[in-house]
Image (cartoon, rainbow, N blue to C red):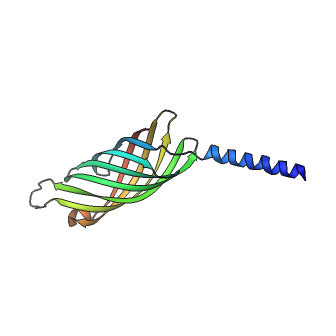
């Protein structure tokens, strides 16, 4: 009977140790850049704030430039973060944002810019270095909800590389 209790205690400690090693907590704050876009160039100032142990909020303020338009956007996402292996994580999230678009003049086409609201999803992978550096690659599909119709009717496949300082 005594050996059974000792076995239970040792097994419980081993289980908790393994869980503690495989579960990597995310940083309280991360600030950096998110670079990329599906049809031009985009740059965003990106801020992440942990909410709980494995969840975070991400806020991105950015500029998009393509052949047909220039746009400023503010996006907010709620993300769930999971460990893949060691310092590699994968994450997914949902959110949305708002922005302003200005169309480039085109012969025979009269397009006005304006405000818009969009919904967004998010999925990506990241590497958390031993120094306070976080690199990520993610995919953010966006769909227009309210605002300028010709801009929001399209479904945007936003792919970007992120580099953030963690603190």
Examine the rendered structure and indicate whether residue 146 appears above or below residue 21. Answer: below
In the image, taking residue 119 as reference, residue 151 lies left or right, namely left
Measuring from the top left, give residue 13's x and y in whole percent: 73, 46
Q: Is residue 35 visible?
A: no
Q: Quadrant of the C terminus?
A: top left
Q: 39 or 135, which is in the foreground?
A: 135
Q: 138 or 117, which is in the foreground?
A: 117
Q: How many marks?
A: 0
Figure quadrant of residue 76: bottom left
Q: 109 or 148, which is in the foreground?
A: 148
Residue at position x 16%, y 59% in the image: 113
In the image, taking residue 99 as reference, residue 84 lies left or right, namely right
Q: Residue furthest right?
A: 1
Residue at position x 28%, y 51% in the image: 39
Measuring from the top left, give residue 59's x and y in whole percent: 35, 50
Residue at position x 41%, y 60% in the image: 94
Measuring from the top left, give residue 46's x and y in whole percent: 35, 45
Residue at position x 19%, y 53% in the image: 69
Q: Is residue 19 visible?
A: yes
In the image, taking residue 36 as reference, residue 4 lies left or right, namely right
Measuring from the top left, give residue 23's x and y in whole percent: 59, 47
């Amino acid at each position: 009977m005594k050996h059974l209790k000792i076995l239970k205690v040792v097994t419980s400690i081993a289980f908790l140790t393994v869980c503690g090693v495989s579960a990597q907590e995310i940083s309280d704050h991360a600030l950096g850049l998110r670079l990329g876009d599906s049809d031009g160039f985009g740059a965003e100032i990106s801020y992440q704030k942990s909410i709980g142990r494995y969840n975070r909020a991400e806020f991105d303020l950015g500029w998009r430039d393509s052949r047909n338009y220039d746009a400023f956007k503010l996006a907010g996402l709620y993300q769930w973060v999971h460990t893949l292996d060691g310092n590699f994580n994968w994450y997914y999230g949902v959110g949305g944002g708002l922005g302003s678009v200005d169309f480039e003049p085109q012969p025979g086409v009269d397009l006005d810019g304006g405000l818009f609201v969009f919904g967004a999803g998010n999925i990506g992978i990241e590497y958390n270095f031993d120094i306070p550096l976080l690199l990520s690659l993610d995919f953010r599909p966006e769909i227009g909800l309210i605002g300028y119709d010709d801009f929001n009717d399209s479904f945007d496949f936003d792919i970007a590389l992120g580099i953030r300082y963690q603190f």
